[in-house]
Image: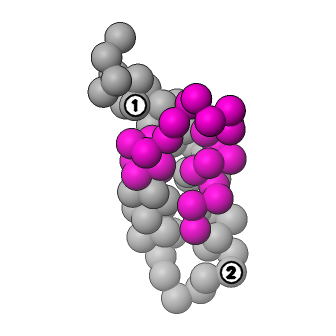
Amino acid sequence: MTTINITNNRILQHLNFAKSIARTKKKNIKFISLEEIQSAAYYGLVQAANKFDPNKNVAFTTYAYDRN
């Protein structure tokens, strides 16, 4: 499996994770639509997946969530 396939699979496996974070953030941000927050969450997920190093012994969800 190529690096691109691994990254794409990681993104697909964590879409619900990003969506969940977006819903949580929406509770505190009233002036931005849920769709915009989800879009930002998905963008952050892609960035995290592209920069993630599994050799660092950190779970992907921890790495992706801590990228404020």
Number of callouts? 2
The dot on residue 7 is 1
User: In the rendered structure, which segment of residues is drawn in magenta?
Assistant: 45-68
Asked where in the image residue 25 lies, by quadrant, the reply is: bottom right
| Helix, strand or loop under label 1 | helix
Q: Residue at x 61, y 82 (%)?
A: 29
- The residue lying toward the viewer, choosing from 46 and 21, is 46
Q: Which residue is mark 2?
A: 28
- Disc 1 crowd rating (10 Å Cα; few below 14, some 14-19, many 20+) is some
Quadrant in which the N terminus is drawn? top left
Q: Nearer the viewer, residue 10 or 22?
A: 10
Tell me where residue 14 sits by quadrant.
Answer: top right
Q: Residue at x 68, y 32 (%)?
A: 57
Residue 50 vertical placement versus 65 (above, below): above
User: Which mark, residue 58?
Assistant: none
Q: Left or right of 10: which side holds 58?
A: right
- Residue drawn at x 51%, y 36% is 53
* Residue 28 on the magenta segment: no
Task: Specify whether 11 is left or right of 54.
Answer: left
Percent coordinates x, y for residue 11 in the rendering: 45, 37
Callout 2 amino acid: Asn
Looking at the rendered structure, the secondary structure element under dot 2 is loop
Q: How many angstroms separate mark 2 from mark 1 (CA)?
A: 30 Å
